[in-house]
């Protein structure tokens, strides 16, 4: 229910922005693309996480609102998948753990859009906020495959399920992108994102827990503006 409420208000907020944008002649865009994501930080003992990137995707909409000549405010609404992969060897068997997280994100960027040749160069940066709406952790090794749904909560209690993977739902950070928009409205951009919040919940089952996990990654987007 909480996830549905968050999603409802995110869609409502962006729909209101779009109505205002269309009535004011602002520019609406749709985009999608590939993510290369990782989870960086420390484990419960304070050692650096040795994770590998996984491939995900993103899709959504945004709107360009002029604030000065060649400068725009660009709010957006995205569905984005993130996570990481990790390998450990136990008794001669390699176990691969793959974490996949799904987010609804609202990026709030300041964008420079300047004429270049027959199109426009794009450079943008700003904060984002995200809310986790789902995820899975899969462990594979030998003949063993375990898959568990992610549960989002801020504090893990001592009697919570041992096999359930837990993360905080709320995320926030910074993003930057650069790209090119052709005269017809088609655009391509390279994105980078740095999570600034620890999404690992407080775990009361682990004394002196030093773990910290943050989303990081980059991606490539293809979109159309009209």
Image (tube, rainbow, N blue to C red):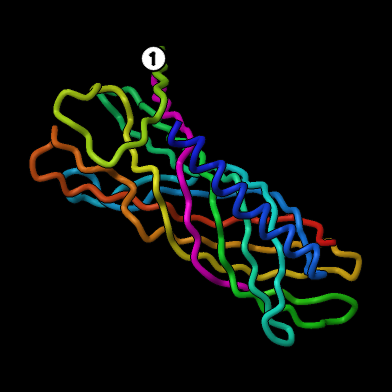
**Secondary structure of the residue carrying numbered label 1:** strand
Residue 45 x, y percent position in the rendering: 15, 45
Residue 217 x, y percent position in the rendering: 50, 55
Q: Which residue is mark 1?
A: 144
- Seen at 58% across and 42% down, the residue is 56
Left or right? Give the position of 170 relative to 80: left
Nearer to the camera, 145 or 125: 125
Residue 137 vs 193, above or below: the answer is above
Instruction: Give the quadrant of the C terminus.
Output: bottom right
Total numbered labels:
1
Instruction: Give the quadrant of the N terminus.
Output: top left
Residue 51 x, y percent position in the rendering: 38, 45
Left or right? Give the position of 135 relative to 43: right
Magenta segment's dominant SS is strand
The answer to which quarter of the image holds residue 164 is top left
Left or right? Give the position of 121 relative to 123: right
Residue 184 x, y percent position in the rendering: 91, 65
The answer to which quarter of the image holds residue 92 is top left
Badge 1: residue crowd in 10 Å (few <14, some 14–19, many ≥20) = few
- Seen at 37% across and 61% down, the residue is 196
- Seen at 14% across and 28% down, the residue is 158
Residue 65 vs 209, above or below: the answer is below
Nearer to the camera, 55 or 160: 160
Residue 152 vs 25, above or below: the answer is above
Region in magenta: 124-142
- Seen at 42% across and 26% down, the residue is 138
């Amino acid at each position: 229910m909480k996830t549905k409420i968050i999603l409802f208000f995110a869609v409502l907020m962006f729909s209101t922005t779009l109505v205002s944008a269309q009535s004011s002649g602002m520019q609406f865009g749709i985009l999608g693309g590939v993510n290369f994501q990782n989870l960086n930080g420390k484990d419960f003992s304070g050692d650096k996480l040795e994770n590998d990137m996984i491939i995900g995707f993103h899709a959504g909409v945004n709107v360009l609102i002029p604030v000065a000549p060649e400068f725009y405010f660009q709010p957006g609404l995205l569905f984005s998948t993130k996570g990481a992969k990790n390998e450990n060897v136990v008794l001669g068997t390699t176990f691969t753990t793959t974490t996949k997280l799904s987010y609804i994100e609202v990026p709030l960027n300041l964008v420079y859009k300047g004429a270049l040749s027959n199109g426009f160069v794009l450079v943008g940066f700003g904060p984002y906020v995200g809310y986790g709406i789902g995820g899975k952790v899969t462990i594979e090794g030998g003949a063993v495959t375990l898959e568990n749904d992610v549960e989002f909560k801020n504090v893990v209690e001592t009697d919570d399920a041992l096999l359930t993977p837990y993360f905080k739902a709320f995320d926030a950070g910074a993003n930057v992108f650069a790209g090119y928009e052709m005269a017809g409205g088609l655009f391509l951009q390279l994105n980078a994102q740095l999570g600034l919040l620890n999404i690992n919940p407080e775990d009361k089952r682990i004394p002196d827990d030093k773990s910290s996990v943050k989303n990081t990654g980059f991606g490539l987007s293809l979109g159309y503006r009209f």
